[in-house]
Image (spheres, helix red, strand yellow):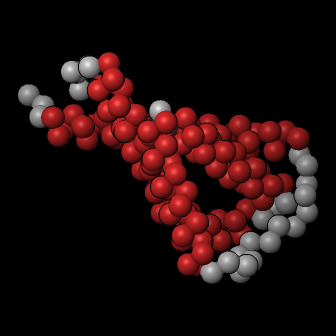
């Protein structure tokens, strides 16, 4: 028989997968639209050092906190932020393909993109988890 902790962990993994799917849908829609419209905006500049790593870190922390605590608002803001983030990445990916700069994009985003996107997905899963607990308490649902 499953314990409550195993059920909660299983639910959280499902929430993170749902958030990943939302991000992936945003990326895919934006990428496909970029490639269909085939608008070349010219050469993109990656690794432009306008911001320090500390500024970027605190910006990402603030976005992650907004995503997490929007669980108290039934996760609607977090879902929108994840979707918009996916749209932006899909558009940049499409533009890098059109302008033949895909390798530059991969090199410039790989080091920070993986932990950043993972943190956004975990924060989104946390928001969905918070929303679920609020709904359970409000409607007095005892099922896991």
Q: Quadrant of the N terminus?
A: top left
Q: Quadrant of the C terminus?
A: top left
Q: Quadrant of residue 104?
A: bottom right
Q: At which x and y percent is residue 72?
A: 44, 39
Whether 99 is drawn above or below 13: the answer is: below
Question: Residue at 36% across / 38% down in the picture?
Answer: 129
Q: Quadrant of residue 137?
A: top left
Question: Residue at 78% across / 59% down in the picture?
Answer: 96
Please state which of residues 118 and 64 is positioned toward the viewer in this rendering: 64
Q: Taking 110 as reference, is 65 left or right?
A: left
Furthest toward the front, the residue is 138
Furthest toward the left, the residue is 1
Q: Taking 8 as reference, is 42 left or right?
A: right
Q: At which x and y percent is residue 113?
A: 56, 63
Q: At which x and y percent is residue 52?
A: 63, 81
Q: Is residue 16 visible?
A: no
Q: Taking 127 as reference, is 95 left or right?
A: right
Question: Residue at 33% across / 23% down in the picture?
Answer: 138
Please state which of residues 14 and 110 is positioned toward the viewer in this rendering: 14
Q: At which x and y percent is residue 18?
A: 46, 35
Whether 31 is drawn above or below 138: the answer is: below
Question: Residue at 71% across / 51% down in the picture?
Answer: 88
Please state which of residues 61 and 48 is positioned toward the viewer in this rendering: 61
Q: Is residue 65 visible?
A: yes
Number of numbered discs on residues? 0
Whether 41 is drawn above or below 47: the answer is: above
């Amino acid at each position: 028989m499953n314990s409550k902790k195993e059920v909660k962990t299983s639910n959280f993994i499902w929430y993170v997968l749902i958030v990943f799917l939302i991000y992936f849908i945003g990326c895919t829609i934006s990428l496909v639209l970029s490639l269909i419209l085939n608008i070349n905006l010219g050469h993109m500049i990656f690794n432009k050092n306008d911001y320090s790593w500390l500024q970027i870190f605190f910006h990402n922390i603030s976005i992650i906190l907004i995503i997490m605590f929007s669980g108290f608002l039934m996760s609607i803001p977090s879902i929108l932020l994840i979707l918009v983030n996916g749209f932006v990445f899909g558009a940049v990916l499409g533009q890098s393909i059109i302008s033949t700069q895909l390798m530059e994009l991969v090199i410039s985003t790989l080091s920070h993109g993986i932990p950043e996107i993972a943190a956004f997905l975990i924060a989104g899963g946390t928001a969905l988890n918070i929303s679920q607990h609020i709904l359970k308490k409000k409607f007095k649902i005892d099922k896991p």
